[in-house]
Amino acid sequence: MSQPGTVTPEPKNTSLLIRGSIWIAIGALIAAALVCVVWVLIGDQDGLIGRAFLTILLLAGFAGIAILEAGLAPNRPDWLALASMVSWIIALIVGAFKIWLPEDGQFFSGGERFFQLLLVIGILQLALLHVRLFTPAAQRYVTVFTRIIYIATIVFLVGLVGMLLFFLTFTHNFEFGDLFGRILVALTILTAVGTTLIPLLNTLFAPKKQTAPVHQAAPALATWPTYADGATPLPVMPDGSPDWNAYYTGFPSAPQLAAPVGGTYYQGQGTYPGQSAAQQPAPQYQAQPLPALPVPVAPQEPAAPQYAAPAAADFAPVAEPAPTEQPAPAPAPEEPGGHAVPPAPAGPPAEPYPPAPPLPPQ
């Protein structure tokens, strides 16, 4: 059983200005088409087919540009999307006038009108670019003076563009006197002055952008050198330096001592928080003192046990047992010669053992 595909709804732009600009473009397209139809019906027959074909091309080009502007509108500010759409609508109107205005009998009138239409489009886009770059510059340092300069410059720019478009649209239909040219030059100068004042004020009075300080990483501390295997550290010399000869010979140059229990801290063997590598003191190695060799101690005789003084009852005289009567010695046997053999002398009587001393108190 196949699962139905999930359709992700596209985010809709709810800006009223962007929607309004799209509807304005649609209305302008319809109005231009109706005006061209009226000119076809009531106009003369001179060049009717060619003008109708150019009108179709103009409307198709405007429709494509309107679709492109609608696609770019969500990624632009609202005022920029609206101004861009209005500029293309003005170009559409000027193009329709250039197509359907009657010819004055001069040579190359068609090429001249097409060139004037390109000039109109270029002027509109340059004015739009000017506003797009001028607005962020004016918002960088906002005061009453800069706000007045910004508004006046935009007004002068709109007047200058309007006069240029009117001149290029009706070049051969009206006579433009000397006053028109003077006003055009004056507006150009005022627009240029206002355009240069805002960047100059920003340079002099606007706060500078503070760049974030670049944190340079501290250089890595040198590790203790090792043998060729990269894991076994080299032995330590008595002065605390590595034994470089052991790297080549494989044997320590000095007898190694066992590390003291609990470790020893040396001065300069670490960094403190917030201390850069340049501020660290040079490592000072301290030689470890030789451990004291154990001296053999002569064995001592065990001390005589000390007993507690016995009680008075312990010193009572012990009655000696009564001596037992010795049996009468047997008569000495007589030897064959008639002489009697004397008996063996009796030894002294054995003294009794003294009583065992009392146990020491526990």
Image (cartoon, grey):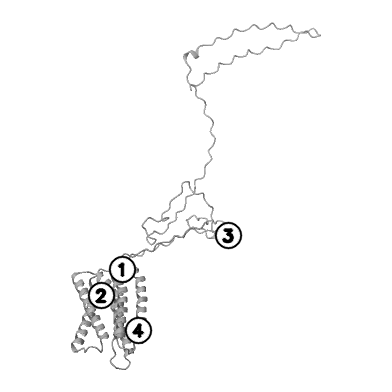
Q: Which residue is mark 1?
A: 19
Is residue 187 or residue 269 the one in the foreground?
Answer: 187
Q: Residue at x 57, y 61 (%)?
A: 248
Mark sitting earlier along the chain (4/1): 1
Does the image show residue 129? no
Comparing marks 4 and 3, which lies closer to the viewer?
A: 4
Q: Residue at x 31, y 68 (%)?
A: 19
Label placed on residue 199? 2
Comparing marks 2 and 3, which lies closer to the viewer?
A: 2
For mark 2, does the 10 Å Cα neighbourhood hold few (<14), some (14 to 19), or many (20 or more) residues? some
- What is the CA distance from the residue labelled 2 to the residue labelled 3? 73 Å
Does the image show residue 194? yes
- In the displayed structure, 97 sits above or below 27; it is below
Q: Which residue is mark 3?
A: 249
Q: Quadrant of residue 163?
A: bottom left
Q: Which residue is mark 4?
A: 52
